[in-house]
Image (spheres, helix red, strand yellow):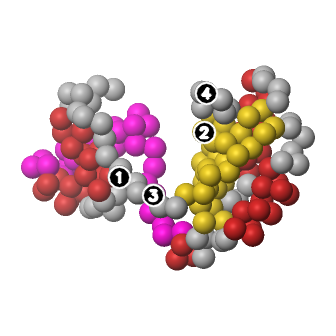
Amino acid sequence: MSLDRTDFKILAELQKNARISNKELATKLGLAPSSTHQRMKALLEKKIIRGFYADIDLSALGMKLQAFVSIQLKRHSKNAFKKMHAYFESLPEVLAVYHVSGKDDLIVHIVVRDSEELKNLILDRFVTHDEGFRCETSIIYSHSHHPSLPREQA
């Protein structure tokens, strides 16, 4: 699907507020609500929009510590990567798993309540895994997230 300026404007508005009504979105874009609805439907069908999410303050839920765990696998194979990726995704503390280039093979973004929980997670669920790997933990002191599209291509 080739995107035009209006499609990019729809995506940008949704990144600011995914709960915006079709009517409000149409008004912001200067389109008829039916046209906006058809464009949204096409973006969803083509899986350009993969979903709508709530931005939750994890610290308000008691999850005050986030970290990246860099993983180096001892054995490299497609199956080993798939197995480790699936394993890490199954852990409730894991927010994201990245397969990366460089000295590390995977980077796992985790959230826990405190440093004691982090230590136990690493010792009980990470370093004891059958695949065997080296891991290094980096605590995230602060972060910001700015959802926005790269410059428009249309």
Quadrant of the rendering where the N terminus is positioned: top left
> Which residue is denoted by mark 2 in the rendering?
98
- In the rendered structure, which disc, 4 or 1, sits on the residue that comes first in sequence? 4
Residue 79, horizontal then vertical, whole percent: 79, 27
Left or right: 102 as drawn, with respect to 130: left
Q: Decide: marks 4, 1 in contact (CB < 8 A)?
A: no
**Residue 119 in view here:** yes
Which image quarter: residue 39? top left
> Which residue is denoted by mark 3 in the rendering?
143
* Mark 3, secondary structure of its residue: loop
Which image quarter: residue 11? top left
* Mark 4, secondary structure of its residue: loop
Residue at image position (72%, 63%) is 118
* Mark 1, secondary structure of its residue: loop
Residue 41, horizontal then vertical, whole percent: 34, 43
The span picked out in magenta is 29-58
For label 4, the crowd category at 10 Å Cα-Cα, with few meaning under 14, some 14 to 19 and many 20 or more, is few
The amino acid type, in three-letter code, at marker 4 is: Gly
Is 48 part of what is drawn in magenta?
Answer: yes
User: For the residues marked 3 and 1, what is the alpha-carbon distance in whole angstroms?
Assistant: 10 Å
> Which residue is denoted by mark 4 in the rendering?
102
